[in-house]
Image (cartoon, rainbow, N blue to C red):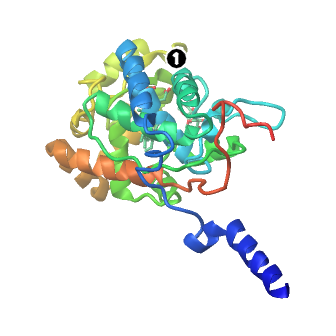
Amino acid sequence: MALSISFLMLLTALALSPLCFAFPHGGPFLFPQFYDRSCPKAHEIVKSIVAKAVAKEARMAASLLRLHFHDCFVKGCDASILLDSSKTIVSEKMSVPNRNSVRGFEVIDEIKSALEKACPHTVSCADILALAARDSTVLVGGPYWEVPLGRRDSLGASIQGSNNHIPAPNNTLQTIITKFKLKGLDLVDLVALSGSHTIGQSRCTSFRQRLYNQTGNGLADFTLDPAYAASLRSRCPRSGGDQNLFPLDLVSPTKFDNHYFKNLVAKKGLLSSDEILFTNSPATKKLVELYAANGELFFQHFARSMVKMGNIAPLTGSMGQIRKNCRKVNHA
Ligand code: HEM
Ligand SMILES: *[C@@H]1O[C@H](CO)[C@@H](O)[C@H](O)[C@H]1NC(C)=O
Ligand SMILES: *[C@@H]1O[C@H](CO)[C@@H](O)[C@H](O)[C@H]1NC(C)=O
């Protein structure tokens, strides 16, 4: 009797803590086959809805790629960015880098509801963001990579994290390097991932400072090509036009290629945070020149760095939850 009771207790202990035995270092790893049994159609469903959205509007590829970045830099890749404000949550959508700027939430909603129909309560919103970022990249001509999966969704959001951890376009290179380093990302990751700005748009307000008063002496940023600066000023005046949109890559704004890096070499990077990669440090300058000359190498490094970024502090195992609606936490 005593023996069978302790045997039962042992069984119970084993049943309660299988993850502790299998993953002594704090939770299981992400792996690409995570949904192969539980939701074999997941990849196809995400891809088809992303493809439809990008066919309707090419910029959506950029917007979905950026959502994954802004998710991962705040409390890890846990879909915290998707939560709307509620009684207990201040949405990250209200932060300085996100407000009037991040977009694509309706596309994520559409993917989520299709996935809930196909395999209820199985695919996390955080994994949807990671897959949508990859599919978006491929759809506009960028590299393919296998996306490690198995992330779970957060129970909260952090607007402070969003304001503090996401780099700003007028941050110094040192500040940006530090913000990446805090997420485990190095100089190669920084330069390769900045190559995302080969697609998408920026508002006037994100780079106006460069056009009129970069260093507080009333002069334009001298690292900006004068003719390019003049053309930007025509639609980004000293005051007004804050929301006017400009391509981050003036040569091929809807194609994922290495023109972004060629533009930096030609002093035609749109954001200060772009151009300083070429002008402010020999190490990042070298990488910019390398990618400008070798698009294949940029693609390889980009794919590798996207996997690295996607691995930032995921919730796994029994942490967090699988949200039913990406905009709100499930009720208990
Ligand atoms: C290195 C530091 C970075 C800074 C300072 C930065 C800043 C910005 C800014 C200011 C915009 C324009 C936002 C607006 O005016 O509405 C933007 C757009 C964008 N960013 Fe970044 N970014 C950085 C890194 C990244 C990374 C790592 C990724 C992806 C992995 C990324 C992807 C994008 C994309 C795709 C867009 C265009 C979005 C759209 O058109 O909807 N950025 N970024
Ligand atoms: C960066 O831009 C923000 C928002 O426009 C502004 O408040 C801040 O003063 C700028 N910082 C620097 C160092 O120019
Ligand atoms: C440029 O910025 C400096 C410092 O922020 C400010 O004192 C000066 O008035 C500005 N000059 C112009 C021409 O806007």
- Picture coordinates of residue 135 (x, y %)? 36, 33
Q: Does residue 289 show up?
A: no
The residue to which callout 1 is attached is 243
Name the quadrant where ligand 2 sits.
top right
Q: Answer left or right for 149 relative to 78.
A: left
* In front of the other: 157 or 123: 123
**Quadrant position of residue 84:** top right
* In front of the other: 3 or 261: 3
Q: Amino acid at mark 1?
A: Gln
- Picture coordinates of residue 67 (x, y %)? 51, 34
Tell me the SS state at disc 1. Answer: loop
Extreme residue in the left direction: 293
Q: Residue at x 41, y 13 (%)?
A: 235
- The N terminus - image quarter: bottom right
Extreme residue in the bottom direction: 3
Neighbours of disc 1 within 10 Å: few (<14), some (14-19), many (20+): some
* In front of the other: 307 or 322: 322
Q: Answer left or right for 79 relative to 47.
A: right
